Amino acid sequence: MLQIAIPNKGSLSEEAVRLVREAGYNCKRYSRELVVRDAAHSIEFIFLRPRDIAIYVSNGLLDMGITGRDLAVDSESEFTELLDLGFGRSRFHYAVPGESDLTPNDFDGLRIATSYPHLVHQDMEKRKMAARVVRLDGAVEISIAMGVADAIADVVESGRTLTEAGLKIVGEPVLNSSAVLIARQPTVLEKEDVTHFVERVQGIVVAREYVMVEYDAPEHLLEMACVITPGIESPTVSPLSKKGWVAIKSMAPKREVNDIMDKLAAMGAKGIIVTAIRTCRI
């Protein structure tokens, strides 16, 4: 039976459960169960602290796990990233007081407060600097005002919390993070049940990035239409009963769909319809 770790709380947990359920698996908790068994697929979903998941997976205690890339790297565990799941996106950044001229290259000998000490140590080693890392479990942004640190390193989504604390981001991201599906080694994909799970989940992840665009167009504009909506391999084209017209269907990136519709309308396409894709295999 496969054993797969899922975060036990927070937005990472909610999104992970939603993704796995959309892939057709039963992993819904009704209370605070630590284990949910999907007997139909011979899978146990183990709910753990997101910070601990990479440790369990790297020690071979679980087959796979869903966690944040930043948390997995900071755990100092050996793991293989099987799939970027497309949610929980964030950046790991340094921040200093708004009036400060400090940059990450000035941190030698300074105090850096963070909940991710390994990431900071790793980056300081790359920069060949020796900063003092102050480990905190939360509320890192207040540490400078409290006199505990000279700079901080933290996960940033919108950056609003830092701005409210009178801080500003400095330097490039130390790490770009998102939710990821991890395993101990890539050889886990040699197991059929693992591959089946990964393919199902990947189908949902990919489907979330695309929509299906359908429209009618004059046949003489087919070449132009294929440029606007090239699809994955090529568009599906079918003749209409109206002479000289064709129906075209194509997958398109969701983020570009409004521009695509504008171009199709300007080209002379009619009956443009955009629909969501629940899952797919490409």
Image: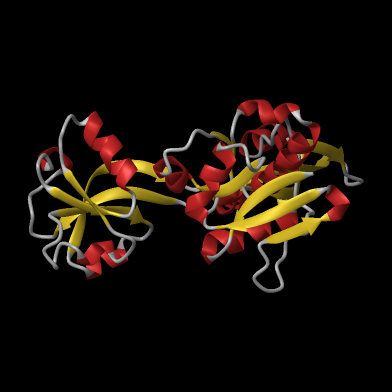
Instruction: Give the image's coloring scheme.
Output: secondary structure
Q: Residue 125 in the image: x percent, y percent? A: 23, 31
- For residue 23, say whether it is visible: yes
Residue in the foreground of this view, choosing between 106 and 112? 112
Tell me which residue sits at (12%, 54%) in the image.
150
Residue in the foreground of this view, choosing between 84 and 67? 67
Q: Residue 169 in the image: x percent, y percent? A: 23, 53
- For residue 267, say whether it is visible: no
Answer with left or right where residue 93 lies relative to residue 226: left
Answer with left or right where residue 71 lies relative to residue 122: right
Residue in the foreground of this view, choosing between 40 and 266? 40
Tell me which residue sits at (65%, 43%) in the image.
62
Answer with left or right where residue 34 lies relative to residue 24: left
Quadrant of the rendered image containing residue 218: top right
Tell me which residue sits at (60%, 29%) in the image.
185
Residue in the foreground of this view, choosing between 146 and 225? 146
**Quarter in which the N terminus is drawn:** top right
Image mark count: 0
Give the vertical position of 192 relative to 197 (above or below).
Answer: above
Answer with left or right where residue 244 lies relative to residue 70: right
Quadrant of the rendered image containing residue 119: top left
**Quarter in which the C terminus is drawn:** top right
Q: Residue 59 in the image: x percent, y percent? A: 57, 37
Tell me which residue sits at (62%, 48%) in the image.
209
Give the vertical position of 51 relative to 237 (above or below).
Answer: below
Quadrant of the rendered image containing residue 16: bottom right
Q: Residue 121 in the image: x percent, y percent? A: 27, 39
